[in-house]
């Protein structure tokens, strides 16, 4: 019954022969159905239903299973194992091709290469390079019945900026690139090679999305030979859209949203007609027993650490404002204060700075578990202690404010500082004060201060670059999540009331 619901949704008569197997011709060509997802972001509980959809379709069609990226990072489920848990689930599902998203780089490139090696599926990417050569194969060909389907991968060039820390080693050397220049030409070369190798159909697994400067629509318009684009990155819900390519041919474009909101089903009829549908995962009532067993096993192994209580709070530590809108990237929040204080405590610095983009989720009131900390700070960035001049600190603050009032991942949450700003026709930094001996005094641009911060803010990210020449000081290596744990333990396991609301460290004064 579950399978029939899917096939009815597809609206493809060829998929309904399961109802009349005794009357069906054994020589009847079967449709090819590509089951796809994108931007799952570690929603591990969805894979069993995803596999069940695929298995139901498999009864009456030749099936291929793919992802368009961003599966490796997104919460505690992945963070505890740096992606190994979700890879185990994907291997249980069984994928035919895997494209990369920008968040596959969150644990840095060496870890990405390890994870890719443990996947029981080929990784395809035409524009992730080392020394001008692709790191992974640009495409993979799959034989399905008497047809050959090629999957070509493409990754947003924004990855090199958004995840820039992943592309540098500790000496700031860069060995890998995702070049923006020549993107369409790289994809076209991969498509042409796949066609020469015998592909009847070429499908692009794209992690470009719908937001400029590089979009899947633009790529379609500047290439030929692609039959369908299964997109990702922008979290858009696109059931089916047709875009004209460089020569005026129609190319199907689809994207499922994110976090397993939908499962995508692309049908290729025996006559070569393309049609796609989205199936809301909430409507799926069945689950793959095989995948469920793997998921339950992972949860059982992780539960002792994952669900362990670290502290208790009478109130939520928030990244949102009172209206429920995310604020941590353009305003002070109580969780921002807490994280900055944790980093200052862990490093022993006079000042601590935290980029708002590193703080991803609020911590609810009640028992604070390790899962909550890792959900809030999933990147597990390495903590550093540096010696910086006041002028460098001022430069970093200005860089963090450079996009205000727009959200900006480089906006800094602070500890040991007070920042005074005036808002009129533009934003003006009036003064910065530093805490000394229990009082606040003006920050001296020529004086040196010790600063606790992540390696991302210190040297790896692109939003803040003021500390590239700052001296690194001896400091026990911790991650930001470990710093949070230790700070909570030092507080006796109870979050004090001083963190109930933002403490007035970043003050905006409206000018008339």
Image (cartoon, helix red, strand yellow):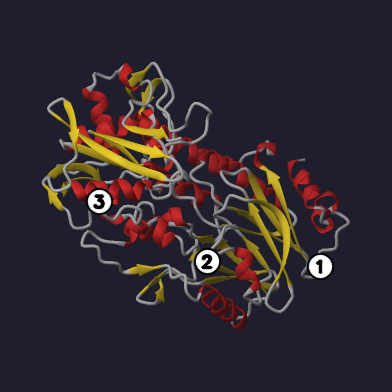
Where 5 falls versus 490 (above or below)?
below
Q: Are marks 2 and 3 in contact (CB under 8 Å)?
A: no
Work out whether 211 lies above or below 353: below
Asked if residue 207 is positioned above or below residue 235 in the image, the reply reads below
Q: Quadrant of residue 281?
A: top right
In-front residue for pair 99/270 = 99
Instruction: Residue under label 2, please give it.
Output: 154
Q: Is residue 76 above or below residue 225?
A: above
The CA span between labels 1 and 3 is: 64 Å
- Does 282 sit left or right of 384 as displayed? right
Image quadrant in which you'd find residue 373 = top left
Quarter of the rendering containing residue 226:
bottom right
Q: Nearer the viewer, mark 2 or mark 1?
A: 2
Question: Percent x, y for residue 333?
Answer: 39, 31
Q: Earlier in the sequence, mark 1 or mark 3?
A: 1
Which circle, 2 or 3, is nearer the viewer?
A: 3
Q: Which residue is mark 3?
A: 458
Q: Determine contact: label 1, label 3, CB under 8 Å.
A: no
Could you say whether the residue bearing mark 2 is in a helix, strand or loop?
A: strand
Q: Position of residue 511 (x, y in %)?
A: 43, 35
Q: Which residue is mark 1?
A: 27
Q: Earlier in the sequence, mark 2 or mark 3?
A: 2
Q: Position of residue 25 (x, y in %)?
A: 85, 63
- Asked if the residues shown at circle 2 and circle 1 are in contact, with their CB atoms under 8 angstroms apart, the answer is no
Point 30% across, 18% down: residue: 496
Real-space Cα separation, disc 2 to disc 3, in angstroms: 30 Å
């Amino acid at each position: 019954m579950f399978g029939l619901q899917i096939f009815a949704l597809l609206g493809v008569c060829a998929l309904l022969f399961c109802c009349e197997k005794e009357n069906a011709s054994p020589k009847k060509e079967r449709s090819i159905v590509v089951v796809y997802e994108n931007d799952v972001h570690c929603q591990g509980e969805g894979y069993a239903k995803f596999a069940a959809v695929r298995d139901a379709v498999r009864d009456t069609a030749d099936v291929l299973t793919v992802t368009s990226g961003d599966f490796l990072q997104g919460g505690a489920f992945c963070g505890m194992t740096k992606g190994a848990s979700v890879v185990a689930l994907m291997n249980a599902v069984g994928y035919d091709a895997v494209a990369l998203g920008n968040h596959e780089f969150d644990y840095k490139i060496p870890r990405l290469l390890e994870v890719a090696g443990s996947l029981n599926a080929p990784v395809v990417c035409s524009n992730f390079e080392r020394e001008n050569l692709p790191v992974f194969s640009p495409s993979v060909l799959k034989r399905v019945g008497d047809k050959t389907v090629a999957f070509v991968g493409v990754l947003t060039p924004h990855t090199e900026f958004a995840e820039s820390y992943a592309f540098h080693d500790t000496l700031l050397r860069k060995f890998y690139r995702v070049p923006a220049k020549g993107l369409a030409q790289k994809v076209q070369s991969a498509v042409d090679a796949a066609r020469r190798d015998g592909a009847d159909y070429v499908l692009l697994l794209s992690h470009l999305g719908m937001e400029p400067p590089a979009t899947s629509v633009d790529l379609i318009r500047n290439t030929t030979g692609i039959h369908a684009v299964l997109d990702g990155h922008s979290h858009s819900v696109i059931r089916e859209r047709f875009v004209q390519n460089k020569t005026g041919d129609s190319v199907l474009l689809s994207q499922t949203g994110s976090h397993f909101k939908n499962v995508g089903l692309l049908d290729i009829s025996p006559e070569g007609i393309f049609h796609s549908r989205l199936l809301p995962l909430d409507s799926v009532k069945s689950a793959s027993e095989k995948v469920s067993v793997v998921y339950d096993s992972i949860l059982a192994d992780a539960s002792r650490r994952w669900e362990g209580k670290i502290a208790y709070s009478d109130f939520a530590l928030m990244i949102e404002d009172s209206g429920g809108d995310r604020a941590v990237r353009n305003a002070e929040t109580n969780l921002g204060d807490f994280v900055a204080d944790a980093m200052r405590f862990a490093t022993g610095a006079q000042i601590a700075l935290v980029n708002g983009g590193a703080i991803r989720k609020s911590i609810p009131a009640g028992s604070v578990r390790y899962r909550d900390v890792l959900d809030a700070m999933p990147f597990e960035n390495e903590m550093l202690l540096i010696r910086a001049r006041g002028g460098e600190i001022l430069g970093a603050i200005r860089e963090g404010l450079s996009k205000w009032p727009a959200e900006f991942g480089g906006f800094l949450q602070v500890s040991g500082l007070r920042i005074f700003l005036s808002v009129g026709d533009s934003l003006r930094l009036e003064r910065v004060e530093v805490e000394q001996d229990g009082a606040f005094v003006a920050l001296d641009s020529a004086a040196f201060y010790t600063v606790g911060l992540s390696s991302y803010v210190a040297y790896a990210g692109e939003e803040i670059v003021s500390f590239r020449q700052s001296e690194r000081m001896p400091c026990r290596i911790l991650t930001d999540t470990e710093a949070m744990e230790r700070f909570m333990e030092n507080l006796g396991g109870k979050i004090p009331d001083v963190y109930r609301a933002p403490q007035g460290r970043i003050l905006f004064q409206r000018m008339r």
